Amino acid sequence: MNSVSEEIGEIDGVSGVDVTLETGAVTVRSDREIARTEIAAAVTEAGYQLAD
């Protein structure tokens, strides 16, 4: 899941990303509101899919 953290971490304004493998949860810290579509695109780029 490092690839997920890396891809999300490249989004402008993101200051931290935590991924919990057991649950698949992703926590994003940022200094601006990040659109879900931006996060979904980064997750897809990493080869995964964002759950609804």
Image: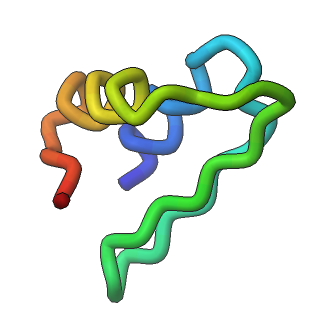
In percent of width and height, residue 6 lies at: 51, 32
Query: Which residue is painted at 44% across and 48% down in the image?
Result: 2
Q: Is residue 45 above or below residue 23?
A: above
11, 34: nearer the viewer: 34
Q: Residue furthest right?
A: 31
Q: Is residue 11 above or below residue 31?
A: above
Residue 2 falls left or right of residue 48? right
Q: Foreground: 35 or 16?
A: 35
Residue at the spot 21% in from the left edge and 49% down from the top edge: 50
Count of residue discs: 0
* Quarter holding residue 15: top right
Q: Position of residue 22 (x, y in %)?
A: 34, 87
**Which corner quadrant of the image does residue 16 belong to?**
top right
Q: Quadrant of the N terminus?
A: bottom left
The residue at the far bottom in this view is 22
Q: Position of residue 36 (x, y in %)?
A: 40, 35
Q: Residue furthest top?
A: 12
Horizontal side of residue 32 vs 41, given as left or right: right
Residue at image location 18% in from the left, 59% down from the top: 52
Is the image coloured rainbow, by chain, by secondary structure, or in one colour?
A: rainbow
- Compared to residue 42, the image places residue 18 above or below, namely below
Seen at 85% across and 30% down, the residue is 31
